[in-house]
Structure formats: structure tokens, C-alpha cells
Image (cartoon, helix red, strand yellow):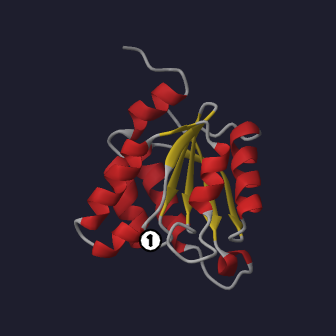
Amino acid sequence: MVWKTAILTASDKGARGEREDTSAQVIRELVEEELGGEIVEYRIVPDEQDEIMASLIELTDYFKADLILTTGGTELAIRDVTPEATSLVIEREVPGMSEAMRSAWMERNRSAMLFRGICGIRGRTLIVNLPGTPRGVHECLAALMDQLPEALLMVTGQYRQ
């Protein structure tokens, strides 16, 4: 199964072209090599709740992504609003996935306890907030990789018991 995947980066500096988006590169590699997914859309938006929400809605409703992986905006800074934007567009939360990411990442990095990312479902799309660093992205996505295919089968309505 080829999963249609979208990447959304929340970064003021990235949106202004002042920073290379290396976290999205890690996501792209893991999705294509480990999950067998296809990137159907990639975009960078500033750390603005309304812009993040609008992008998440468009990626689910227009692009029909099976999976949206966000990066950035998930820590404690005032402008880190990706979890809040995500919570306003999802219909159901998937707390076990968020817990698994934090737990796995904290084994190697105690500051992972400051990561506030959430996971949830909008329609038939799974949305996963990832950290804004390449290492954090790798640690968190690796923690989910073995369960993502089954989760995506369930979310997209293709799961057969």
C-alpha cells in the first residue's frame, strides 16, 4: 500500500526562507524508505495558529492525504502553537501514539518531556505532530513506524480483521 503523505512545517524562519528545513528531509526519507509512502504535498507556514489550521484542513479535505506529519511548533515557546492548531481540526485524539513518541525520545533525551505534540484523526486522515529537530523527528517517527501501517488501515477504513 502506498500511503499519501503530506508534510507541514511550522517555522517562522523557514517560512521566510532563513532556515533550511532539514526536519522535513528526515520525514521524507523515513516515509519513502520505511513506510513506502508518497509525498503528495509539502509546505512551510509561519507559527500562526490560523495558518497551521488552514493547511491541515486543506491537506485533509482537498489533498486527501492519508497521513499528515507536522514538524515544528511543539515546544514551550509562545509561538509554538502546532498542538493547539491540530487539536482544533481533529475529530478524535490518538493519545497512545503521542505517549509512545515521548517515551521513546525521553530514553535518549530528557528534554523530550517538553515536547507537546499530539496525534489525531480528521476524517480519514491521521495527523501526527513531530518535533522541529531532525533528531527528534527521527526518534519520534521511528517509535511509531511499526504501528503506522495498521493505524492507517484503520483510519482509512481499509482494516480487515
Q: Which residue is mark 1?
A: 134
Tag count in the figure?
1
Q: Is residue 130 left or right of residue 79?
A: left
Vertical order, 41 against 94 (above or below): below
Is 41 in front, or is 150?
Answer: 150
Find residue 81 and report its horizontal and vertical position in percent: 62, 65
Question: In the displayed structure, would residue 87 be above or below residue 126?
Answer: below
Give the residue drawn at x 34%, y 59%: 102
Q: Nearer the viewer, residue 141 or 86?
A: 86
What is the three-letter code of the residue carrying label 1? Pro
Q: Nearer the viewer, residue 18 or 101?
A: 101
Give left or right: position of 41 versus 26. Answer: right
Question: Image height check: is 78 above or below 130?
Answer: below
Left or right? Give the position of 144 relative to 20: left
Residue visible at 43% across and 64% down in the picture: 137
Q: Is 63 displayed left or right of 87 in the figure?
A: right
- In the image, residue 161 lies at what x, y percent? 36, 14
Count neighbours of disc 1 (C-alpha within 10 A) and say few if under 14, some if 14 to 19, many if 20 or more. Answer: some
Q: Which residue lies at the image location 76% right of the left edge and 46% below the top edge?
A: 58
Residue 65, position as x, y percentages in the image: 64, 40
Question: What kind of element bears circle 1?
Answer: helix
x, y (%) of residue 134?
44, 71
In this view, which residue lies farthest toward the top?
161
